[in-house]
Amino acid sequence: MYYILSLGVFGLLFGSFAGASVWRLRARQLALDAENGEKVSRKDKRQVDKLKRGSLARDRSVCLHCGHQLAWYDLVPLVSWLWLRGKCRYCRHAIGKSEPMIEATMAVFFVVSYVFWPYQLVTPVEIAQFVIWLLAGVGLAILFVYDLRWFLLPNAIVFPLIGLGGLYSLTVLAEQQFAWSQLMSSVYASAILSGLYYLIYVASRYRWVGFGDVKLGLALALLLADWRLALLTLFLANLIGTLIYLPMMAKGSVKRQTHIPFGPFLISGFILSGIFGTSIIDWYLTIALGIV
Ligand SMILES: [Zn+2]
């Protein structure tokens, strides 16, 4: 119980960090776009100017509406938002629901990961692997929101995730006494999640998926270090994507040409596979196929 409570609190804190990182990254990206002479919408520019005035330099958070710097008691994850009923203390402007949602989601993610973690948590290596998983989840939360809003997976997050993935694969490999089959499992996982997206990326002439998806796929594959889990991730990502987009297409609210951010589906599939994947695969092999 003690572990669950502390993990929940850590989840809230990391969720708060993830929510703030989304805006910091966005500000950085827009500054870069402006330098490269790309168009930046007025609304984006206004928000970034406010961020710059208030927070970026001193790394403090500001209200996106009035630019007022927020005190520590305005930044208590979830609690502040509930206390202020989702409004800024200074200008009473509604704060978006996305920050408290990221915080709550991360708390749930930390707790569910611990409760349903499919591996033992005894040796230092096993605990390190669990910590890598949680940290990866924080990065993925940032990517999830970012890709959903702006159809982009920033390298500033994807590259560290690939690093974390490499580390994870390495620890699994060491546990298996550097068995060839384990190494190949990571390699196949990368081929399934990253290689396939690369093929689609090239075949569709860079239109259906972005190169960001290719890099994200590599990070996820290395974080799974198991080709079966990689396959399951791909399957779940497509399933979730289809379940969400088919009704929207039927209603006509999205057209076929609409750019679909695939990152969030891939991330959702990955989280499900990472936590429940081994159980799902065992269930499938024994019940559905009758293999013991
Ligand atoms: Zn305000």
Image: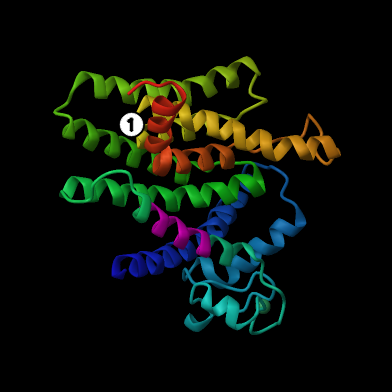
Residue at 54% across / 37% down in the picture? 266
Residue at 46% across / 46% down in the picture? 157
Q: Residues within 10 Å of mark 1 (few under 14, many from 20)?
A: many
Q: Main secondary structure of the magenta part?
A: helix
Horizontal placement of 247 versus 292: left or right? Answer: right
Q: Please tell me whether residue 164 is drawn above or below residue 121 in the rendered image.
A: above
**Magenta stretch in the rendered image:** 103-113
- Image location (x, y in percent) of residue 163: 34, 39
Would residue 69 be seen by someone viewing this image from the given angle? Answer: no
Instruction: Determine whether the beta carbon of the residue marked 1 sits less than 8 angstroms from the nearest atom of ligand 1.
Output: no
Looking at the figure, which quarter contains the C terminus? top left
The foreground one among 13 and 36 is 13
Horizontal placement of 158 versus 171: left or right? Answer: right
Residue 138 painted magenta: no
Q: Please tell me whether residue 249 is drawn above or below residue 271 in the rendered image.
A: above
- Image location (x, y in percent) of residue 113: 38, 52
Badge 1 is on which residue?
A: 225
- Image location (x, y in percent) of residue 254: 80, 38
Q: How is the image coloured?
A: rainbow
The foreground one among 190 and 177 is 177
The part of the image, by quadrant, that contains residue 243 is: top right
Residue 106 painted magenta: yes
